[in-house]
Image (cartoon, rainbow, N blue to C red):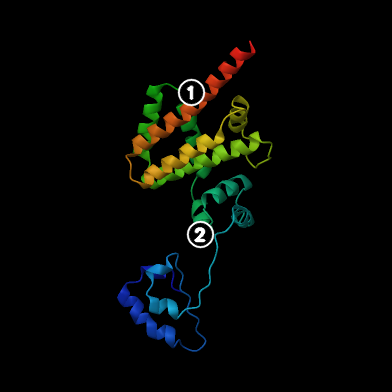
Amino acid sequence: LIERADRMSEAAQNALLKTLEEPHDDTLLILTTSQPDALLPTIISRCQHIRFDLLSTEEIKYALIKRNVESKQAELIAQLAKGSFGRALALTETTLLERQADAVNFLRTSLYKTQKSLLEEIERISSEFQKDDIEEFILLLQAWLQSAMAVGEGYILPDSADDTLQKFVRHHPDIQYAELLTSTNRAISLLHKNVYIPLVLISLALELRATIAELARDRRSSLSVEA
């Protein structure tokens, strides 16, 4: 089994050609890659191609539960795994629920705390986390918002009993979750473009706060019309 075969140098791939053409008896050679175009055409032409699609969230969740991962954590990991069970297994080694609570605290600070508190929180996050950790941090916030959206629509989820989640849903019954999720996606895109991390977080916080502020203005306007 040759994993990530695309990482072989051109010389290594050429050296493998003879073995691929005339393997030893009772030998099966398996090359895996997510970037087949990086392999030499001579390698590709000598292999039978078998495509493996990404796993669904439910498939990953079920497999994790069979490995005795608690249901709520399995749900969260499955959302973050992006179809990869290997990534899901790696995520089981981290304290995701604690990290998600930290991400939700960032949301709370963005929406309800003073500008000074927000800047202090952003400074703390930027100093404690690396770029990959920041992306996971935002993905955890995104997963929580998706759960809030589902609960608001009446779905029963493993984390439906979460008091913080329930309070947020009750307090913002008309919130535009699509706009919040768009903001998190934009923040992740900026990270991939190597934008300065504190700037990414400030931009995300301001967009989240603006969405809530717009909702509050709409409510006041509606009350004025009714009056």
Could you say which disc has been placed on residue 50 in the image? none
- Report whether 195 appears left or right of 109: left
Does residue 161 appear in this view?
no
On the rendered image, what quadrant is the C terminus found in? Answer: top right
* Kind of residue at badge 1: Tyr
Query: Badge 1, how many Cα within 10 Å: few under 14, some, many 20+?
Result: few
Local secondary structure at mark 1: helix
- Where is mark 2, residue-wise? 86
* Kind of residue at badge 2: Gly
Q: Which of 215 and 117 is in front in this view?
A: 215
Of all residues, the one furthest to the top in this rendering is 227
- Where is mark 1, residue-wise? 112
Of all residues, the one furthest to the front in this rendering is 225
Does residue 60 appear in this view?
yes
Of all residues, the one furthest to the left in this rendering is 11
Q: Relative to 21, is 138 above or below?
A: above
Residue at 44% over, 31% down: 207
Residue 8, position in %: x, y? 35, 71
Local secondary structure at mark 2: helix
